[in-house]
Image: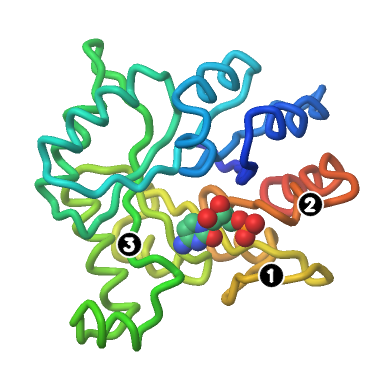
Amino acid sequence: MGKDVIIACDFSSKVEVVDFLSIFTEEKPYVKIGMELFYGEGPDIVKHIKPMGHKIFLDLKLHDIPNTVMQAMKVLSDLNIDMCNVHAAGTISMMEAAIKGLTRADGSRPILIGVTQLTSTDEARMHKEILIDKPLDEVVLHYAKNVKAAGLDGVVCSPLEAGQVHQVCGNDFLTITPGIRFAEGSVGDQVRVTTPAKAKEMGSDYIVVGRPITSAKNPIEVYRKCLEEFID
Ligand code: C5P
């Protein structure tokens, strides 16, 4: 599974995302579709973008009882997406059920990724509100081990954690890393950020880049800069 740059298409309507993607006439970038677009436009958004030639990471972060997740994954698998995800906190049996639901009759399935702790959850909140009293990095690595034990392909994590995750779970275990910024760009609401070059150095397998590309004056130029730094 090769390294790639995934563009987070955090737009609120099909018109906006299709307008944005139509500027890419040479490359067909891997795109991430999140809850806002999927809930607003329905599964049709995937059926519309997929034939445009893009790979799709459907970022819906499922978390429910195993049977419900399995049935939902069957529906997502039929949409012909390339990657999707669940919360690792749903337990190993939920993640195993997700794989079962996602696997098609011919044995193929999209890449399945586990979300460890959201980057919006800091250690203090995790201690105080979720009553997990271990250090955050220990929790992330423990969740990553559960994700691997359940047979999933990798985790979403900070690029700063990618090296440690590979050390514990192996180099074939994928790290999908948001929080990418260029040295000269604005950080926005992200806290722990890294450049594409640094993410490559730290062993990320896929970087997820949103606003630095989607809000750029010339998105194609920035996308190419990401590819150049991260892959070449
Ligand atoms: O615009 P920006 O580059 O910050 O977009 C990053 C994308 O990655 C957003 O879609 C965000 O929801 C997602 N993400 C994240 N941190 C996580 C998980 C997902 O930034 N831990």
Which residue occupies 50% across, 20% down?
44
Give the amino acid at mark 2.
Ser
Which residue occupies 35% across, 44% down?
85
Callout 2: few (<14), some (14-19), or many (20+) C-alpha neighbours within 10 Å?
A: few
Which residue occupies 25% across, 17% down?
104
- Residue 215 is marked as 2
Closer to the camera: disc 2 or disc 3? Answer: 2
Closer to the camera: disc 1 or disc 3? Answer: 1
Q: Quadrant of ligand 1?
A: bottom right
Which residue occupies 50% across, 43% down?
34
- Residue 116 is marked as 3
- Residue 213 is marked as none
Element marked by disc 3:
loop
Q: Which residue is mark 1?
A: 188
Residue 103 position in % (x across, y down): 24, 23
Element marked by disc 1:
loop
Residue 60 position in % (x across, y down): 39, 43
Query: Does the numbered disc 1 mark a residue whose Cβ is under 8 Å from ligand 1?
Result: yes
The first of marks 2 and 3 along the sequence is 3
Nearest the camera: 227 or 31?
A: 31
Residue 204 in view: yes
Real-space Cα separation, disc 2 to disc 1, in angstroms: 12 Å
Which residue is most to the front?
40
Give the amino acid at mark 3.
Thr
Question: Vertically, is 205 above or below 137?
Answer: above
Q: Is residue 120 left or right of residue 94?
A: right
Residue 121 position in % (x across, y down): 39, 74
Residue 5 in view: no
